[in-house]
Amino acid sequence: MKTFNLGWLLFVAILLISALPFSQASRSKQHKVKTGVFRSPQIVLDPGSVANKLFSNIDFPRGHIALKSFDAEIVDESGNPIPLYDTYLHHWLVLKFYVREGLENQDISKLNNSDYISGRNSGICQDGALDQFFGLGSETRKTKTHIPDPYGIEIGNPTKIPSGFVETWGLNVHAIDTRGVEDRMGCTECRCDLYNVTKEENGTPLSPNYDGGLLCCYDGTKCRLKDGFIGIERTLYLQYTVKWIDMNSLIVPVNIYIFDVSDIWKKSRNSTGINSEHNCQVEYQVESCRATGSANDKCIDAKSVSLEMPFGGYLVYGVAHQHAGGTGSSLYGKDGRSLCSSLPIYGTGEEAGNENGYIVGMSTCYPKPGTKKISKGETLILESNYNSTKQHTGVMGLFYILVAETLA
């Protein structure tokens, strides 16, 4: 039987490794993915109640890094996942802030405007709308958020943090406890009559045409319960898993854009040229096709908007956000080419992540690198479709994309 000298085998192995292209060897060494599992502060809910919290300076990876994914779900104190028919996760948002040094542990909602700066994404919405870096809703458990190599969302770059400020992260969680409620879907759509709400949180009277949405299910409101129902108070958390890698020269940063099909925008001219003014409504209402007299076999409410891309680049990732009743959303280029189509995944069972009748996931787009180029100033068309056999209030038609300015 033939034998081999151990030293000779080691020598051959070293030669093989040294023969690898430098970039391949470097990527395998430097792109070590780190994972952190965190929890939000507690969210206390009793049947029918609503929590819409903004948590400041949450646990989050620090340093000059590239984010690779962010996944989340509602769990109880033992870490058990909570199904949507018990606690509906309307949305969660991850927001970046630059806070004045020494104030980073303060509640950001109580700081003076001069003490913090929104580290918003690259999107076109204005006035604080849709500033998040990550964000999903009921679809969170079955929607992919992974960013493929060699791309990543760069954070913690010391050259981009304003002098005298520190980078912090906030978490907005909007959850509705639907145990024992009279109308589960009505509560998740925030129908004003079910919440007995006639005024906004700040006391402003609601428009007579506003049947439901975020203005009727703010923090502390309560959806109507069935007569005689009694349930216990419980403590829940948003548990989130973050993956990241240390930033290095091989990582290609991506920019985040969030488009809104309900965006009302116009061009304006000033001394610096032509500007676009965007007023993202974030939500809208779908009327019943029978009520509008437009009933047909399909009964689809199709809403679309044309938007200008502020910067150019290559599409890396795309996904839509819709509520129950949604049938899909698409983003097109100016020549009608498809950039990304995202379809809802509806649950068919009872277990968490497969709740019958709820959107439990959205399909995602991962184009082959370099195949989906968007030009600066290009007009994009966003479409959002909903089944309109019945009215839906407070629906959304958002589209989240990641764009790299250069190829790998």
Image (spheres, helix red, strand yellow):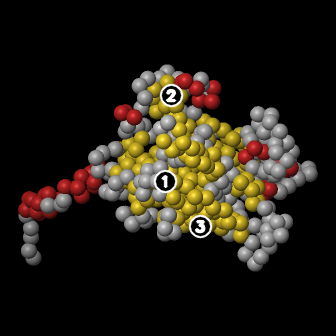
The residue drawn where x is 79% and y is 68% is 289
**Could you tell me residue 329's position as x and y percent?**
60, 64
Quadrant where the C terminus sits is bottom left
Residue 298 location, quadrant: bottom right
Label placed on residue 120: none
- The Cα atoms of the two marked residues, 3 and 2, are separated by 38 Å
Label placed on residue 309: 1
Report the residue that reaches farthest toward the top.
102
What amino acid is labelled 1 in the image? Met
The residue drawn where x is 34% and y is 44% is 247
What amino acid is labelled 3 in the image? Leu
**Could you tell me residue 39's position as x and y percent?**
56, 42
Please tell me how crowded label 1 is: few (under 14), some (14-19), or many (20+) other residues with Cα within 10 Å.
some
Quick one: SS at disc 1?
Answer: loop
Asked if the residues shown at circle 3 and circle 2 are in contact, with their CB atoms under 8 angstroms apart, the answer is no
> Badge 3 is on which residue?
343
Quick one: SS at disc 2?
Answer: strand
Q: In this view, does 134 lie above or below 298?
A: above
Sequence-first disc among 3 and 1 = 1
Is residue 20 visible in this depiction of the protein?
A: yes
Sequence-first disc among 3 and 2 = 2
- The Cα atoms of the two marked residues, 2 and 1, are separated by 29 Å
What amino acid is labelled 2 in the image? Val
> Badge 2 is on which residue?
99
The residue drawn where x is 19% and y is 59% is 21
